[in-house]
Structures are given as C-alpha cells and as structure tokens.
Image (spheres, rainbow, N blue to C red):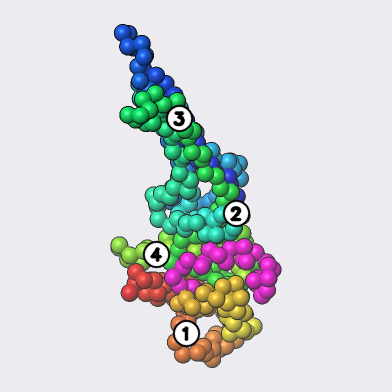
Amino acid sequence: MFIDSAKIYVKSGKGGDGIIHWRREKFIPKGGPDGGNGGVGGDVIFIADKQINTLLDFRYKKKFIAKDGNVGEGSNKEGRSAEPIYIKVPAGTLIRDAETKELIIDITDDGQEFVIAKGGRGGKGNWLFRSPTNQAPRVCTPGDPGIEFHLELEMKLLADIGLVGFPNAGKSTLISTISAAKPKIADYPFTTLIPNLGMVYFQPGKSFVVADIPGLIEGAHEGKGLGIQFLKHIERTKALLFLIDCTSEDIKKDYKVLANELKAFSKDLPKKKKIIAITKLDIADDEVKKKLKKLKFPKGVIVHQISAATNAGIADLVEAMWKLTSKGK
C-alpha cells in the first residue's frame, strides 16, 4: 500500500538524576561526597533509507519514545546513558511540526540523519558541589526532561522527470517501455492509482528517474479525480513530460488544460523545463495523421510524436529527456 503522509509523536529520554551519596570505605567512617551524575537520555533520530518507498509503517506505529538515562551511582560513577532510537523514513521525506506546520527538515539523501529530539542531560551528583567551604554538600539536581513533538511526515518522490497527462494518455505504457517499472496497464481511465518510479538507462553510465502519477482531469487542483493527491510528487522533478493522446479532439487545448492545472497547484511547476509527447501513433488513422501534420506549438516548445507500443520515436524522446535533466547538460 502506498502511503505518503503520516502523523507521529516522538519524545526523547529524560536525563537521569544526580544523587547524594557518601564515600563509605573501611577505616574511613566519614568519607566525602561521591554521588555521580545521571546519564543522558536517549535521542530520537530520523534516518533516510532508500529501500523504503512508503510511510505505511507509521500507520501501525505512531509513538516513538526513547528511554531515560540512569541515575548516578556512588564512587562518582555516572549513570548509563540511554541508546538513541532511529526512525527510518524514505529519502524525500519532509518533517513538520504538527502544531505550527513549520518545516523542520527535508531529508533527501540516502543515509542522511537528523536528530529531531535530543535526550535530556543528566543531573549533577553531590560530588560536583563540593568546595573548600562546603565539604559535605547535601544537594543534587534532577536530569533535564526529554523533548517531545507531534510531527507530520510527508513523502515526495525524488525523480528527474515527471510524466503529466490525462487518464489513459499512455503514461504507464511509456514508463514500462523505457524502464524496468511494471505499472498496471489497461484500456480505461485511472488505471494508475499510485505514483510509479522508473529508472531509465539512456547509455552506459547515463541514467535518470521518471515519475508517473495518476492522470489529471480538468479541475484537479480543486480536488477532482485522483491526480491532485499526487501532484506534489512531481514538485521536485527537474523537468516535465506532457503526454497527450493523438486521437484527442483538441491537442493544444489538452495541453493548456494540463498546464493550467499545474499552475493552479503550484506557481513553480510551470517554470520547469518541459517536453510534449503526442502518444499512440500506432492507432492514428489517416485523418489523425493529417491533423498532426498541421499541428503547431509556439516556438521553443519541444514536441515528439511516439508510439510506446511499437517503439516509434521512443529513442529520440529518451535522448531529449536525458538532455532536459541536469545530468544531460
């Protein structure tokens, strides 16, 4: 199951208390203070793991509480510090304060760690309070409390190019053709219900990642259809590939509708580099082919005509996609 948001509670461990203790040894009936400090409470640490691609685990476990540090001991021994607890999340996870909605950290790199809650410091034992004027201090301090947060986690896929199109425009077929991804494909709208990632190998040592999201419909930014739930997953991409069915009654209008939906969702999406791919050439009849010959987009708009079913135009499209990524410069 694909889950891209979650709410959790985290709390670091309390520091152990310092203690009042007196040195007790044979032949030394009135030993001085030797109460040790308390141990440090456990930290709560997020760590990105590229093997994880959903926040599903947080549906079943929502509380993460580190252990407290141990109290100090005699002989000026510090209490044992608690071990940190690690919370694994997908690379591309944003962590926000659930109450203020403030973004705390955006974890993007595999293996990246972030201490969200430091454990409390241990309290001081009476050994630390000794002085020439107070050689028998009867004072110690408690450990500092742990830190707690209610957090919101939001995952956004990390990809180089995002595929955008209406339902049944051929996005899933294309990603299955150019990569090893195997999304569900069928001849009806909304076949794709969750985002899919595909690694495209352009040439030896040259590859890029493509993200396919459920198809958009007009009014998607207002919550219509499925695409609005997943538009956030193309916000990180370097470029966009618009896919439009060649049998559409008005290809340019379809492009404008898609572009407007992206603009309504985020002012940054229209600024991304883009390519248009006219799909399903294998089913184009003579009338459609004539219409495609007359089709003109504004200068500077890159347009490819393809068929993922027959591989027509695919090689040229993949090369153009590679060039759009920063890797292809």
Q: Earlier in the sequence, mark 2 or mark 3?
A: 2
Left or right: 257 in relation to 128? right
The mark nearer the N terminus, 3 or 1, is 3
Give whichever of discs 1 and 2 has the lower sequence position.
Answer: 2
Residue position marked by numbered label 3 in the rendering:
140
Q: Nearer the viewer, mark 4 or mark 3?
A: 3
* Residue located beneath label 2 in the image: 98
Whole-number angstrom distance, CA of label 4 to CA of label 3: 59 Å
Residue 172 x/y as whole percent: 54, 64
Mark with earlier residue (2, 4):
2
Q: Which residues are magenta?
A: 217-243
Residue at mark 2 to residue at mark 3: CA–CA distance: 36 Å
Q: Earlier in the sequence, mark 1 or mark 4?
A: 4
Front in this rendered view, residue 22 or 68: 22
Q: CA distance from mark 1 to mark 4?
A: 22 Å
In contact (CB < 8 Å): disc 2 and disc 4: no
* Residue at the disc numbered 4: 208
Callout 3 amino acid: Cys
The span from disc 3 to disc 1 (Cα, nearest Å) is: 73 Å
What residue appears at the point 62 percent right and 70 percent down from the top-left corner? 216
Residue 310 shows in the view: no
Q: Are marks 3 and 1 in contact (CB under 8 Å)?
A: no
How busy is the neighbourhood of tag 4: few (under 14 within 10 Å), some, or many (20 plus)? many
Q: Position of residue 101 (x, y in %)?
A: 58, 59
Circle 1: element type = loop
Disc on res. 301: 1
CA–CA distance in space, label 1 to label 2: 42 Å
- What kind of residue is marked 2? Ala
Residue 109 location in percent, x, y? 40, 55
